Image: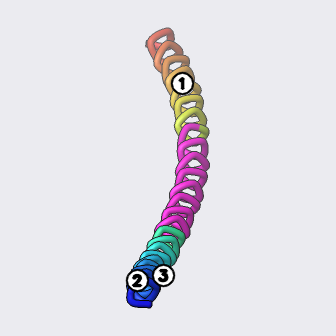
Amino acid sequence: MAAVEHRASKLQFEVDRLNVELKTSEQRRKDIEQEINTAHTRLQEALDIRAQLEEEVLSLTEAVELLQSKLKARRQSLNKRLLGDLNLA
């Protein structure tokens, strides 16, 4: 009978150990899920910021091209006027 009680005690100890391990594993899983959710949120925010920055870069590039075009036209206009003034002189 003592052997049976000893065996039952060992089995109960093993069940208790496995329950503790299970609870620890469940908590780790929850923590990892939270980390994943946080990382996903940060990644989405980064992607949104990237899209905004790409739009800004495109807009600024278009503005620079427009200003360069206007500057070129202005130079040509000034050069024509300058040549006209020189021809009159």
Instruction: Judge by depth and name the residue closer to the eye, 42 or 53.
Output: 42
The colour mode here is: rainbow
Q: Residue at x 59, y 29 (%)?
A: 69
Kind of residue sitting beneath label 1: Lys
Q: Residue at x 55, y 69 (%)?
A: 37
Q: Where is residue 12 shown, x and y percent of the image?
A: 45, 86
Which label was assigned to residue 72? 1
Q: Where is residue 62 shown, x and y percent of the image?
A: 61, 39
**Residue 20 visible in the displayed image:** no
Identify the mark nearer the N-term, 1 or 2: 2
Q: Main secondary structure of the magenta part?
A: helix
Kind of residue sitting beneath label 2: Ala
Q: Residue at x 54, y 51 (%)?
A: 50
Alpha carbon distance from label 1 to label 3 = 84 Å
| Relative vertical location of residue 52 with respect to residue 67 in this rendering, above or below | below
Identify the mark nearer the N-term, 3 or 2: 2
Could you say whether the residue bearing mark 3 is in a helix, strand or loop?
Answer: helix
Tell us which disc is closer to us: 1 or 3: 3
Alpha carbon distance from label 1 to label 2 = 101 Å
Image: magenta residue range: 35-61
Tell us which disc is closer to us: 1 or 2: 2
Circles 1 and 3 in contact, beta carbons < 8 Å: no
User: Is residue 50 shown in magenta?
Assistant: yes
Query: Residue at label 2?
Result: 3
Q: Where is residue 76 shown, x and y percent of the image?
A: 55, 20
Circles 3 and 2 in contact, beta carbons < 8 Å: no
- Left or right: 24, with 44 as reference point: left
| Relative vertical location of residue 14 with respect to residue 12 in this rendering, above or below | above
Identify the mark nearer the N-term, 1 or 3: 3
User: Is residue 6 shown in magenta?
Assistant: no
Kind of residue sitting beneath label 3: Val
Query: Residue at label 3?
Result: 15
